[in-house]
Image (cartoon, rainbow, N blue to C red):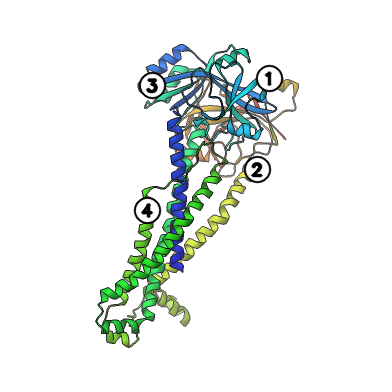
Amino acid sequence: MSVFLMAALSIIVFVGLQGAWHGLQGSLNSYLTENHLPNYWIQGSYITKDDKNKLKAISGIKKVRSGTRLQVNQDKHHLIIDSFQKPLIKLHRVKGDKYNSQSSNGIWINKEYARDHSLKIGDNLSVTYVNQKFHLKVKGIIQSPSRIYFTGTQEFIAPNYANYGYAYVSPKALKKVFNYRGPQNIVEIDGKHKNFRKEIEKIFGARLLTYYNQQTLPDVSTATERVGEIKNLSYLFSFIFLLLAILAMYTTIRRLITSQTEEIATLKALGFSSFKIQIHYASFGLLVGGLGTIIGALVAPLISWYVLSSQKSMFSLPNWQVSYSFSAWMVMILVILICIFSAYLAARSGSKGLPAIYLRGIEETKARKIWLEHWKNFWKHLPYSGRWAVRDAFINRTRTLMGIIGVAGGMMLTIAGIGMPQSMTHLVDKAYSTDFSYNKRLYVNNYESYRKSHPQAKQWVQISQAHFSPDDGYNRLLIVVNKGDYVNMKTTTGGDIQNGGLYVTHGFAKRAGIKKGDNLKVKTFGSNKQYSFKVKGIIATETNQGAYITAHTWQKAKGFYQPTTLLVG
């Protein structure tokens, strides 16, 4: 029964998780390929025709498409609207019409936002932009491959489709409905260049606001990284179950042979060779391992669908599929072979000898001193029952090893199963009760005006994308914090954020190799000036990765300070 369970669990875990990660990988790859996911995304204060020509001139760049991005409000909710004459990306149509760049009043809205707000084709959508209300007709419900894990802003770490959505309108509607006469401010780029990040910083300078590639855009990279996470889990847990199956089969067959010494002796006396007897006992491995594998293969698809369904609330994909690779069949065959081979080895070591020896019914075991007995002061203080137990453990090493691995593996699974939800809950509580204790965030357009009219407002925060040097290839956040009671995160040594330097988050510091006392260069997007600060501490936080600095230190270094976020109790 133990071998059957271990074989079945090995297949259930490995094949079940493989169906999830391989299916998710296949769904992602087909979706991103069919819908032409760009390689780079740029947002600037404005984009000129000269900028596009310079981008096209970079080696390896194939296509450049520019457009306009606006953020509007819809009944206290936020919509990010993009407008392209001919988008590089191909939008997946869920319902309604395809995106039409000639539509004068239509809007194409993302599936999740439409679902959470009960929007249907033909509905009139009222949005507010620069304190004016405009009306658009819902022409289509779409999904974008560049927004699979859409959070609305880099400050958030999980999707919130009820409050943040994205949409597309035509340039014609942008001018006619919104009366927008401003410049284009976003670019989608197809192609590859070794050091594209450096090239665009030269082209745009202080006008560069954001830069992403497929690896650094969280809306895409989070989904692709999830494939690797599930894949690693499948290998980890399957290895434990396979190891237990080997040990269980080996010890079970050894015990079976010990209990059937007379039968083995009779068979050998009748002329049966040792090889035939070994094959007979090896068939137990085929039977039990085969049954376990079949049951595991039948149950595995249920696990695959369960794991995939747990991802549907986070990722926006048009199609979800369970898919298996050739390695699933290889593992099934491997489990059966392991059971057969371990049973054969046990039978081989237990069926050698003359029939007369087996008929005595006594299995000779060579006893010898173990290495602990040389420590006489230790050994003589052990009770007799303790010495017996220790000697027995060292003589029956396989059985002892099976017990250790079985208990260790079971304990690991138990602690992981109970501990993971508790750990996640702890991290959420720590982030939003201890590190940040505010109740609301207000986004303010004019800092100076608001500060004068509301002098009691204290905890201001300025959040900017920045290029750090050294870094880990990502544009991280630089968070400038004013005095207040709502940002209370601690360093790894238990200290507070103080004046006089920069505080780097633990995840960013680990990936970029940054240590306390290092000098870190910072260049915020929207500025040409590079600043240098000493790293005063490493912050233990699980939320936004980047660096924190006090407003006093930032202003003293002549940094641009005009925060737009106010934390409120």
**Image coords of residue 116 (percent x, y):** 65, 35
Instruction: Give the labeled residue for mark 1.
Output: 448
Residue in view at x 45 percent, y 15 percent:
51
Of labels 1 and 2, earlier in sequence is: 2
Residue drawn at (58%, 38%) of the image:
158
Secondary-structure class at tag 2: helix
Label pair 1/4, CB-CB below 8 angstroms: no
Reading the image, the residue beneath label 2 is 434
Residue 105 location in percent, x, y?
Answer: 61, 17
Tell me the SS state at disc 4. Answer: helix
Q: Which residue is mark 3?
A: 62
Q: Earlier in the sequence, mark 3 or mark 2?
A: 3
Which of the labelled discs sits on residue 329, or is there none? 4
- Tag on residue 201? none
Crowding at label 2, few (<14), some or many (≥20) Cα neighbours within 10 Å?
A: some
Q: Provide the secondary structure element on which disc 3 rests.
A: strand
The front one of 560 and 189 is 189
The Cα atoms of the two marked residues, 1 and 4, are separated by 66 Å
Mark 4 vs 3, N-terminal side: 3
Residue 323 percent location from the top left of the image: 44, 46
